[in-house]
Amino acid sequence: MTTLATAPTVPLIEAPPRRRAGGIVVAVLAVVLGAATVVGSYVLAVLDPRGRALDEAVLRAATGVGLRTEGLTVLELVGIPSVALAVLVLTGVALARGRGGRAVTVVGLVLGSQLVTQALKAGLVRPESAEGNSLPSGHVTLVASLGLALVLVVPRALRPVAALAAVGVTGLAGVATMVAGWHRPSDVVAALGVVAATAGVLSLAAALLPGRRRPRCA
């Protein structure tokens, strides 16, 4: 009678736990750096008189280049219909690739970032201003969150191209808000911080939530 020795069953892939730990570290860094960017923008460019004066000077220089019409034309493209369509397309791409979690992240990133931005804009106070607080920029928040969502849903091979496109479009939106006289530089920078922090929170939640185990091969 022949007895077959069975080798102990071990996971074939040990990298996922390490990747999970690395993902948690990156997510925490995104939250910390994003929050620090928002706080720093507010403290240095809004509460500090010298920073506030410099912020205003840059805004005056931007509005003085004579591109207000062009800036407004760009900003008109960022509206509820266009953003909703972009979210639908991005979630559709994620679902088509079998990435349901990424589809949820797209919606959470765009909506979550905008909710945080609007809450900050309503809650923060701008000294010596009759116009009220404008930090962070809602338009830049939308464009930046959509750009990051694009990077998340495309295949890995296309991510460098998607990242370049996201940076370019976000930069264009930021410049447009300034030349149109809508936002100061600090508003743009704070919006980027909001998106980074929101993305970090979502990534951290995804990393910490228990997932389904992969079947082991005997």
Image (tube, rainbow, N blue to C red):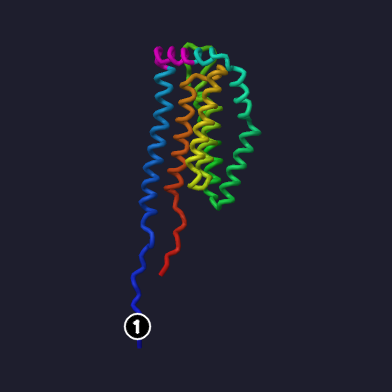
Q: Residue 74, located in which quarter of the rendered image?
A: top right
Residue at point 56% right, 27% down?
Answer: 139
Queried whether the magenta region covers residue 54, the answer comes back as yes
**In the image, residue 201 lies at what x, y percent?**
45, 39
Q: Is residue 36 left or right of residue 185?
A: left
Residue type indicated by callout 1: Thr
Query: Looking at the figure, which quarter contains the C terminus?
Result: bottom left
**In the image, residue 100 lies at what x, y percent?**
55, 50
Position of residue 194 relative to residue 2, above or below, is above
Tell me the crowding category of disc 1: few under 14, some 14 to 19, or many 20 or more residues within 10 angstroms, Cα based: few
Position of residue 158 relative to residue 122, above or below, is below
Label 1, secondary structure: give it.
loop
Q: Residue 143, located in which quarter of the rendered image?
A: top right
Q: Main secondary structure of the magenta part?
A: helix
Query: Looking at the figure, which quarter contains the N terminus?
Result: bottom left
Q: Residue 114, located in which quarter of the rendered image?
A: top right
From which residue to which does the magenta span run? Answer: 47-58
Q: Is residue 2 left or right of residue 168?
A: left
**In the image, residue 40 lies at what x, y percent?**
40, 24
Residue ID for mark 1:
3
**In the image, residue 164 lies at what x, y percent?**
49, 36
